Image (cartoon, helix red, strand yellow):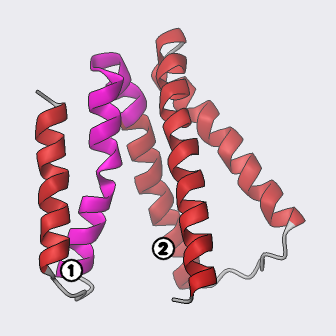
Amino acid sequence: MEFAEMDSAVLFGLITMVTWGIWIILGNAASESMDPRTAAAISYLVAALLAFGFIIVSDASLAVTARGGLLAGVAGLFTGTGLISMYIGFTHGSTTVVSTLGAMYFVVAAVIGIVVLGENLTVTKVTGIAFAVLGIVLVTR
């Protein structure tokens, strides 16, 4: 990865981190003000409209392959399930616990990457995953 690509990756990673952090707080407030399932649906409806708007104003290809469409659809099922679970979780626990556990999705992705996709298992990755698990234990106590 070139330096300019790393800068873009960091920039968009930071934007993702900040916007998703704000989304969690607003989602929690919405789920306290109305049925969390309805709040989740409204949240994703607005996100879908934004995504479609971005497709229209950008140079995104509208070509959909069978494999890509299927994978994107299944990804949407998991995204929707996680979203609904998060909003309902807000009504049963603290924002800190629900959002921290939800944000640990990268641990699941890392393990799948190593076990299923054959990515290298390194001491650094194991240490990072261990610290993430330790963070979950500390936050939930």
Specify the label residue 114 is tagged with: 1
Q: Nearer the viewer, residue 130 or 78?
A: 130
**Residue 131 position within the rendered picture, expressed as x and y whole percent measured from the top left:** 15, 55
Residue 74 falls inside the magenta stretch: no
The image quarter containing residue 30 is top right
Give the left or right position of residue 62, taking residue 105 as reference: right
Residue 100 falls inside the magenta stretch: yes
Q: Are marks 1 and 2 in contact (CB under 8 Å)?
A: no
Residue located at (60% from left, 62% from top): 12
Residue located at (67% from left, 40% from top): 45
Between discs 1 and 2, the one toward the N terminus: 2
Q: Is residue 39 above or below residue 34?
A: below
Say which quadrant the C terminus sits in: top left
**Residue 79 position within the rendered picture, expressed as x and y whole percent measured from the top left:** 45, 52
Measure the C-alpha gap from mark 1 to mark 2. 20 Å
Task: For marks 1 and 2, give the one nearer the viewer.
Answer: 1
Give the left or right position of residue 135, taking residue 1 as reference: left
**Residue 44 position within the rendered picture, expressed as x and y whole percent measured from the top left:** 60, 41
Which stretch appears magenta? Answer: 86-115
- The secondary structure that dominates the magenta segment is helix
Specify the label residue 71 is tagged with: 2
Q: Residues within 10 Å of mark 1 (few under 14, many from 20)?
A: some
Residue located at (28% from left, 18% from top): 92
Q: Amino acid at mark 2?
A: Leu
- Local SS, label 2: helix
Q: Amino acid at mark 1?
A: Ile
Give the left or right position of residue 57, taking residue 17 as reference: right
**Residue 87 position within the rendered picture, expressed as x and y whole percent measured from the top left:** 42, 29
Q: Nearer the viewer, residue 115 or 2?
A: 2
The image quarter containing residue 53 is bottom right
